[in-house]
Image: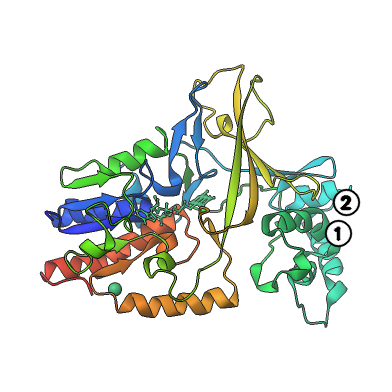
Amino acid sequence: MNSDLVVVGSGFYGLTIAERCARELGLRVLVIDRRSHIGGNAYSEAEASTGIEVHRYGAHLFHTSNERVWDYVTRFTAFTDYQHRVYTNVGGEVFPMPINLGTVNQFFRAAHGPEAARALVAEQAAELAGTEVSNLEEKAISLIGRPLYEAFIKGYTAKQWQTDPRELPASIIARLPVRYTYNNRYFNDTYEGLPVDGYTAWLERMADHPRIEVRLDTDFFDTTQPVNKAAVVGQVPVVYTGPVDRYFDNAEGELSWRTLDFEEEVLDVGDFQGTSVMNYGDEDVPYTRIHEFRHFHPERDYPKDRTVIMREYSRFAETGDEPYYPVNTATDRERVLAYRELAKGEKDVHFGGRLGTYQYLDMHMAIGAALSAYDNTLTPLFRAGARLG
Ligand code: FAD
Ligand code: NA
């Protein structure tokens, strides 16, 4: 094998490692991915009949306050000035999200200032004062009161988890911030925007280096192709960003994930919903939200008489489904610890990314974690001429 490093997975974690190691350390890096495209879940492509950029694995909004990550990503792409805002359709009305002074006043048909709204929510949240919260519903009520919980959290959460919120652990929500201003910007980060030429152009530029080779349609566990686990581990250092349980043949049991189903539709209207993301809070609407991709790029010259929408449905993943969000039950946490021990014993293999660490990571977090691993693990390793431990 004439590679110095094998990277399994071409998502942001794997590509960041590959780019740094090829450019800064002069290594020959082989990146494999089992999918037929690079980029992992951030991958996007133009819908064929309209040219509208569609995020294949759900809407991806870039935002960060990490200067190092911003510095790094802007080497590969410029960003638009898009600012994300979300609305929710519930009970036949549309409200701004996250819950803010506009939401509260619209919901209670009131004209409260911040002080009065805060007092109202505090009074409603006091319903369960002095009792111990034992599930998600009680936790939410203790934070924002029953009326706001029932309108904005209950149905949406039940659909997300396909579980009654009274059956869900309180630990799923740590905070439910209510903003006592009219600010409904979704993110609070210093930097926010969408890649001017799209996600795939950005991801391709990261991989575009003479010492990086990308092999698609190549599964690390497929022993009929040359770069597989049995053939490579121990021969050449590996950065593995696939599911950690799969790497160990589910020896400690399968980790549980939620997955999403997407239903795409091209409509003969120029604008379907007037905004990029509309949540649906009512339980009798089966999807959780609708994305309308043209609104992510108002600066582009998209057709004025057609639009692309994507309905999103949420459910527990079964074997073979794409893993999206860790469920993180107590059993999962025990298993993750056991897998982490196994990973330590796996010489020359570094586990990283969303799937390799069983952690939800935003893009900027995956990139930041990869930059740290590059500094703290890969650079010392290759500079010392030693192997990956
Ligand atoms: P991934 O992108 O998942 O890449 C892992 C890669 O490994 C995949 O390409 C996979 O095919 C490959 N792989 C797995 N197993 C194997 C194998 N056996 N052999 C070969 N290859 C393999 N982040 C944001 O910042 N903003 C957002 O709005 C946002 N929205 C998101 C919405 C959803 C539904 C999801 C799931 C994630 C979202 N993210 C968002 C997170 C973003 O997608 C992640 O940060 C990013 O995917 C993490 O990169 P990664 O490289 O760790 O993992
Ligand atoms: Na290891």
User: Is residue 377 shown above or below 82?
Assistant: below
Mark 1 CB in 8 Å range of ligand 1?
Answer: no
Q: How is the image coloured?
A: rainbow
Q: Secondary structure at mark 2?
A: loop
Mark 2 CB in 8 Å range of ligand 1?
Answer: no
Horizontal placement of 300 versus 97: left or right? Answer: left
Report x, y in % for residue 146.
85, 63
For discs 2 and 1, the disc positioned in front in the rendered view: 1
Q: Secondary structure at mark 1?
A: helix
Residue 77 visible? no
Q: Quadrant of the C terminus?
A: bottom left
Residue 275: name its quadrant.
Answer: top right
Residue 88: name its quadrant.
Answer: top right
Q: Quadrant of the N terminus?
A: bottom left
User: Is residue 267 shown above or below 216?
Assistant: above
Residue 121: name its quadrant.
Answer: bottom right
Residue displayed at 67% across by 30% down: 274
Residue displayed at 56% across by 53% down: 188
Label 2 and label 1: CA atoms lie apart by 9 Å
Crowd tier of the residue under label 2, counting other residues whose Cα lies within 10 Å: few below 14, some 14–19, many 20 or above? few
Residue 223 visible? yes
Report x, y in % for residue 303.
55, 18
Q: Amino acid at mark 1?
A: Pro
Please give the residue where the numbered disc 1 appears in the rendered image: 147
Q: Amino acid at mark 2?
A: Phe
Residue displayed at 19% across by 69% down: 234
Please give the residue where the numbered disc 2 appears in the rendered image: 108
Horizontal placement of 387 versus 175: left or right? Answer: left
Q: Are marks 2 and 1 in contact (CB under 8 Å)?
A: yes
Residue displayed at 58% across by 66% down: 327
Residue ranking furthest to the front: 224
Q: Which of marks 1 and 2 precedes in the sequence?
A: 2
